[in-house]
Image (spheres, rainbow, N blue to C red):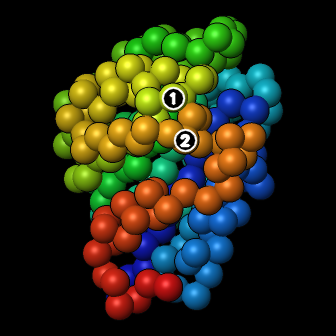
Amino acid sequence: MKSTNIYVIHGYTSSSKAEWFPWLKDQFKNSNVKIHILNMPNSSDPHLEPWLKHLRKNILDIDENTIFIGHSLGCVTALRYILEKSIKIKGTILASGFINENPMDVQTEGIQEFLDESLDIARIKSLISSRIVITATDDDIVPTEATQKLAKALDANLIILSSGKHFIARDGYTDFPVLLNEIHKLINDYSKLP
């Protein structure tokens, strides 16, 4: 059976070693699921083109079994990349994401680059079979309303948690069972999973 590739794109000021990313990678170490947690360049001053270039260089296997997971700024990055590649994939899980405008207190020219050009939503929906969006009502970085707008635009399955804030380590998020459960549902092959 063909393996499932999962690509995880972190957000602003994060890294592949932060938050719940190492824990997630650990969940699939003895399975036919390959998790690639990309370390995005210069995450404290992100710019769209270097981030897309990094994805082009590091995402080598993308097909109808592929799943993208985005966190915060990684969500819109994933959507832009999927549009660019124009290949149908299995699904996306987007946590604390936003679309069209930056809802964060931090406003930089670099972050604005990710939002300047509007996304072809109809095309995104045709390329991504399953779209899942996760938010917490107490998110203090990306307000839950912004993530709910993203879910509505994508016609995604929206999961609203009563707590979890921005799903980052400083909020106690070093694991993410809700997200793991959604991955299992997407893969839908329980016999092969840990």
With 70 as the anchor, is 159 left or right in this view?
Answer: left
Amino acid carrying mark 1 in the image? Asp
Q: Which mark is residue 138?
A: 1
Left or right, 92 with reference to 121: right
Q: Quadrant of residue 22?
A: bottom right
Tell me residue 131's x, y (percent): 29, 46
Check the image and report above or below for 25 versus 102: below
Element under label 1? loop
Closer-to-camera residue (146/70):
146
Q: Residue at x 43, y 38 (%)?
A: 162
As drawn, the residue found furthest toward the front would be 162
x then y, percent, for residue 16: 72, 52
Question: Mark 1–mark 2 contact, CB under 8 Å?
Answer: yes
Q: Is 17 placed above or below 71 here?
A: below
- Can residue 183 be seen by looking at this rendering? no
Q: Residue at x 30, y 32 (%)?
A: 151
* Residue for point 28% across, 75% down: 188
Q: Residues within 10 Å of mark 2 (few under 14, many from 20)?
A: some
- The residue type indicated by label 2 comes to Gly
Tell me the number on the disc at residue 164.
2
Provide residue 165's location: percent of width, then percent of height: 57, 34
- The part of the image, by quadrant, that contains residue 20 is bottom right
| Mark 1 Cα shell of 10 Å, populated few (<14), some (14-19), many (≥20) | some
Relative side of 49 to 43, left or right:
left
x 32%, y 22%: residue: 149
Q: In the rendered structure, which disc, 1 or 2, sits on the residue that comes first in sequence?
A: 1
Residue 42 place in picture, x, y as percent: 80, 32
